[in-house]
Image (spheres, coloured by chain):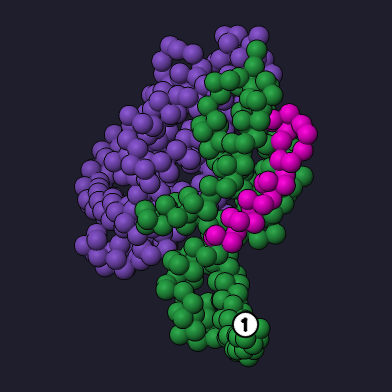
Chain colours: A purple, B green
Amino acid sequence: MTDTVVVAAATTETESKPRVNRRQVAKARTRIKVLEAARNLFAERGYDAATIRDIAKGAGMSTGAVFANFQDKAELFEAVFSDEMAALSEAFTAGVAIEASTSARLAGGLAAGYHQVLDHLPLMQAMVARSWFQPEDSDKRVREFLAPVITTISEVLQAGIAKGELRQDADVALLSRMVWDIYLSNLRRAAFDNWGIEELTPHAAKQMDVVVAGQLAK
Amino acid sequence: MTDTVVVAAATTETESKPRVNRRQVAKARTRIKVLEAARNLFAERGYDAATIRDIAKGAGMSTGAVFANFQDKAELFEAVFSDEMAALSEAFTAGVAIEASTSARLAGGLAAGYHQVLDHLPLMQAMVARSWFQPEDSDKRVREFLAPVITTISEVLQAGIAKGELRQDADVALLSRMVWDIYLSNLRRAAFDNWGIEELTPHAAKQMDVVVAGQLAK
């Protein structure tokens, strides 16, 4: 009796599963298409000038289909931003994973971060621009996406303290934010002076030397 | 004879002057009104969403009157930006004019710079946002407006080297840009964490300590 019930339940699940999956897959595909079209349009025009209508057009679907996945443009932008920050965070983590001085590890993180974004720099520019002029509640969420990168930087600094390279009283919170701000600021050179990875990498290394130099244990 | 000629010339000048002046004054007044309306609207909506039509409305004049003074929105924005940077440059220069360590002088410049912009922060936000997503040729002009501030910072660092406080080989160009980038980055705290001058001033002082610490002569 127990077996029969189990079998019946299993059968029902097996029968309904493909239908659910097909719908889920279709929905996920739509979402990916919309995000891709949004990425492209935000990169091309910036946040303000990109319209849901043109994003829908770029994705080859109706505005209704876009709105079925995202409440509004702001939510769409946050989804693009979130994906971007996740990729950037991975790059940072990989970049700092070297046996080296704190400055060199941080420089490694920044260099990996530039590698990650240089082939779609206009999107990053649109993101930084938007981050300066957006509703406050949106900024709160933006910071959550940023947190993993800041954490990675903090961990490098803390490791430097732990191994006695940096002073025990180094202000990790202050320094971590400074490193991130430096990362972002340099993107302007990439955008307006056409700096590539060959210029950005040694520049970031010098900047990390400046930041770390005063923090070295005597 | 010579006297007569001089008198005649003087008379002509006196007669024509008021007419020219009235026209010039009217034109200057219009320009000021348009710039004021533009400042307000850029601060309220950011660059993209501010329209010439609404700027004209804010100034109480026709769009034609706006276009008589400015070729397009980009030129209008640059004029607002230029005024803002001139005021900021003055503030920096006044802020660093103290007898103190290099770090304290730089911190004084930053603090004065925050004083200058805190009562119209949304305009600064719009400017920073725009600076990240604008045509390249516009960026070139933006840098010209920025040059005096960078020069002021450089001079403080050079003075530090000259008096033997900083190392002879301190990279003044690199450090100056870092100081400016730090100034800008902190404005985000003002915008999104409601930091006032009481929070920004000590924060900037700590950051200047970090930047200068590694540059001290042994």
The part of the image, by quadrant, that contains residue B10 is bottom right
- Percent position of residue A51, x then y: 35, 66
Give the class, few, some or many, for how many residues have Cα within 10 Å of label 1's Cα (few <14, many ≥20).
Answer: few
Q: Residue furthest front?
A: B1
Label count reads: 1
Q: Say whether residue A41 is left or right of residue A155.
A: left
User: Whole-percent x and y of residue A174?
Assistant: 63, 31
State the extent of the magenta-drawn residues as a range.
B81-105
Q: Is residue B122 magenta?
A: no
The answer to whether residue A126 is left or right of residue B24 is left
The answer to which quarter of the image holds residue A161 is: top right
What percent of the width, then of the height, locates residue B156? Answer: 65, 35
Residue A43 x, y percent position in the rendering: 34, 53
Q: Is residue A103 above or below residue B120?
A: above
Whether residue B44 is visible: no
Amino acid type, callout 1 = Thr
Q: Nearer the viewer, residue A182 or B214?
A: B214
What residue is at 56 percent from the left and 42 percent from the top?
B150
Tell which of A184 and B52 is nearer to you.
B52
**Residue at horizontal 58 percent and vertical 20 percent from the top:** B168
* Residue A108 visible in this rendered orientation of the protein: yes
Residue at the disc numbered 1: B2
Q: Could you tell me which quadrant the N terminus of chain B lies in? A: bottom right
Question: In which quadrant will I find the C terminus of chain B?
Answer: top right
Quick check: A212 above or below B44? above
Secondary structure under tag 1 reads helix
Quick check: is B82 in the magenta stretch?
yes
Q: Which secondary structure is most common in the magenta stretch?
A: helix
Q: Going 35% across and 49% down the picture, which residue do you hit?
A: A122
The chain under label 1 reads B
